[in-house]
Image (spheres, helix red, strand yellow):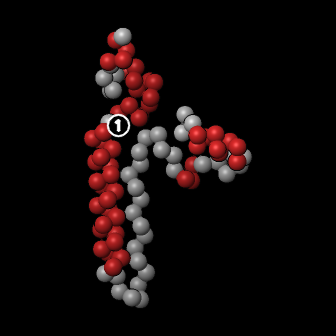
Amino acid sequence: MLLRHLPRDSAFARELHGEESAWGLGEHLLASVIDHLAIGNWLFTSAHTAEGESPPDPPVPVPRPGVADEEDETPGASAEEQELAWFFADL
């Protein structure tokens, strides 16, 4: 079947999966590297902050497609709805 072998940046894949289709393994690995570097820099800065000063805020991870922020979650959702959303990975 030809649809199975379309590239991930094809119009069909973008329509079907949205922004997630543009992110491959390389993009996910690069985002992880950036996050780990930011955490390492934050730890170094926090360890070398003077005692009287407040430590810097922790870094914000690189946003990834398909991963909702905690702030975006609806607080009014029932426990059953949250469990179903978790089970089906918000599909």
Where in the figure is residue 46, as x and y percent of width and height? 36, 76
Q: Is residue 16 left or right of residue 5?
A: right
Q: Outermost residue, top direction?
A: 1
Look at 58% across and 43% down and name the residue there: 86
Q: Up-down: is 84 above or below 7?
A: below
Look at 43% across and 41% down and name the residue there: 65
Task: Say whether residue 59 is visible.
Answer: yes
Number of dots carrying numbers: 1
Look at 41% across and 48% down and name the residue there: 63
Name the quadrant containing residue 21.
top left
Where in the figure is residue 37, as x and y percent of width and height? 29, 61
Q: Up-down: is 46 above or below 76?
A: below
Where in the figure is residue 80, as x and y percent of width and height? 70, 43
Label 1: which secondary element: loop
Q: Outermost residue, front direction?
A: 87
Q: Up-down: is 83 above or below 13?
A: below
Task: Say whether residue 90 is visible.
Answer: no
Residue where numbered disc 1 is placed: 23
Label 1, residues with CA under 10 Å away: few <14, some 14-19, many ≥20: some
Image quarter (top left, top right, bottom left or bottom right) of the N terminus = top left
Image quarter (top left, top right, bottom left or bottom right) of the C terminus = top right
Where in the figure is residue 32, as x and y percent of width and height? 33, 52
Amino acid type, mark 1: Trp
Look at 34% across and 82% down and name the residue there: 49
Q: Is residue 40 left or right of residue 14?
A: left
Q: Up-down: is 52 above or below 8?
A: below
In front here: 47 or 18? 47
